Amino acid sequence: MADALKIEFTAPTLPESGDLVVLVSDALALGATARELLGDGAGLIARAAKAERFKGKAKSTLTIAAPAGLSADRLIVVGLGGEKDRAGLDLVALGAVIQGKIAGREATLIADAPDLALDAEAIAEITLGARLRAYKFDRYKSKAGKKGGDDEEEKGGGRLAIACADASAAKKAAKTRESLAAGVNLCRDLVNEPANALGPVEFAEAARDLEKLGVEVTILEEKQLAKIGMRALLGVAQGSERPARVAVMHWQGGAKKDKPLALVGKGVVFDTGGISIKPAASMEDMKGDMAGAACVVGAMHALAARKAKANVVGIIGLVENMPDGRAQRPGDIVETLSGQTVEIINTDAEGRLVLADLLTYVRREHEPHAVIDFATLTGAIIVALGQEYAGLFCNDDALAGKLLAAGEASGDKLWRMPLGPAYDKQIDSKFADMKNTGGRNGGAITAAQFLKRFVEDTPWAHVDLAGTAMAAPQTDVNKSWGSGYGVRLVDRLVRDAYEG
C-alpha cells in the first residue's frame, strides 16, 4: 500500500510546532546551520544527553519533550557516530531511523551535519529510507484493528519537512527516489497479498496497470501459452482451478536499435508443492512464492516512473501449484518450449519449470543483451546464506560484477555461488534430457544448473531470493513481511550499467 508519508522541502528554519530533528556527531556537535538556528537550545542537547547517557552513536536517538526555548513539541536528536561512521554512513537507513521516530507526526529535519556533506543526492537517499520505513500493509485490518496497539509507527506516515540549503535541487533529486520507493512498495504489496485475493489473473492485471506509466503490456492466456508451447509452465498450473497467465512488460526508454535487458520472474501465487505436498507447518508462507514476479513488476514500475533511459523487458509466469486429479505426477515427462524434456521427480520443484519456458521465450522473442531471473527457488539457498544475501548464479563474469556492485550500492546484497558441469550429473535422467531436481546436496546450485540449460550463450544471471524476499528480517528500512527485495538492485543496475 502507498506510504502515507508526505515530504516537502523548505529553506532552513525552525518549525512553529511538531517535531524538530537534528543530527549530531559522537561529540554531540551540530552542523553550522543547525547550531545557528538552535542558538541557546543547543545546550539542551548536552544536558539531556548527559542525563540519558546518549553518546551520539550512529543511528542512535534522543528525544527531548517540550524543549525549553523552542516552539517544537519534541526535539529529536539523531546520532551520526564518529568520523569513520560518518564516512560510510548508510543514508537510506538514516532516513528510516528518522521516520521511525516521527511516524504519524509532523516534523522538520534540519538537513545539516558536522563534517558530512548533505547535498541534494544525499538528502534524496534520506527520503528514500523514510518512505520505505513508512510502508504499512493493513488493508485487511478492521478499523478497530488499525487503532489497536500503542506503537507510534502503527499510526501512520505523517509529514516530514526537510530544511536544506537548496530545496529545489533536493526536491528534484528526491523525485527519482519517490519513484523507486513506489516500485519497492508495489512489490511489497504483491508479496503481502493473500493468495485468495491475488491469483494468476489478478496478478496479471496488476502488471497491466503499468500501462499508465507508458509500459507496453501483453497478457498471454492459457490457449496462447499452449499454442506457443509453454508446456512446462502449463504443467505446473494444471492441478489448479485458476488459469495460468504470462505477463510481458516492455519499457522502451533507450534507442530503438538497442537490445533490451530482460528481467524474468517466477510467479507461483501459492505453492502447496502439488502431489509432492509440503508439510503443513508454515505453508501459509507460500503465498510469497511469487516474490520474483513481484520484484520484476516493482522494478518495471520504478524504471518507467523515473523514465529510465534504457530498454527493459520484463516477463513473469503466473501459476498456482495445487494437488488435484489433473495435477502432474512424479515420474511424468514434459517437453519444454526449448524442445528439451524433463522428468518430474518432485512436483515441489516447480519454479524452475516455469522459468525454463520463460527463459526460452524471452531469449527467442526479444533477443536481450542479458537476462536476469528472480525466483524464490530453493530452501537450500537459505541454508547456505541465511537471510542476509540472495544467491547469485551467473554464466558471465562481467554481468556478475555489475550485479554485485549494484547489490552493494543499493543494499539488496548478493553473494555469488558456483556453477559447474560436475553438478549436471545430479540432474541427468534415465528417461528424459534432465530431471527437475538433483536431490538435497547442492540444491540451490543444481537448480541453477537446470536453468542454465535454457539460456544457451546469452549472458544470464539467476537470483535466488528465497531468504530475502519474504518472511524477511526486520531492519531499519524494512518492517514488512514482504521486503521488496530486488527492486532497488535492478534500479541501481540499470542506472549504473545501462543508462547512457
Image: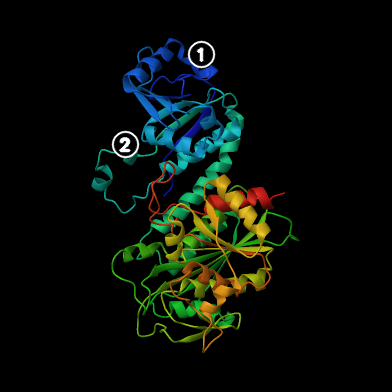
Q: Crowding at label 1, few (<14), some or many (≥20) Cα neighbours within 10 Å?
A: few
**What amino acid is at disc 1?**
Glu
The x, y position of residue 111, in whole percent, is 52, 26
The structure's colour scheme is rainbow
Look at 41% across and 19% down and name the residue there: 16
> Can you say whether 126 is above or below 374 in the image?
above
Marks 2 and 1 sit apart, C-alpha to C-alpha, by: 31 Å
> Can you say whether 12 is above or below 425 in the image?
above
User: Label 2's element?
Assistant: helix
- Give yes or no for contact between labels 2 and 1 (Cβ–Cβ under 8 Å): no
The x, y position of residue 1, in whole percent, is 41, 50
Look at 56% across and 51% down and name the residue there: 489
Q: Which residue is mark 2?
A: 152
**What amino acid is at disc 2?**
Glu
- Left or right of 46 on screen, residue 456: right
Quick one: 419 or 91, which is closer to the camera? 419
Look at 71% across and 62% down and name the residue there: 259
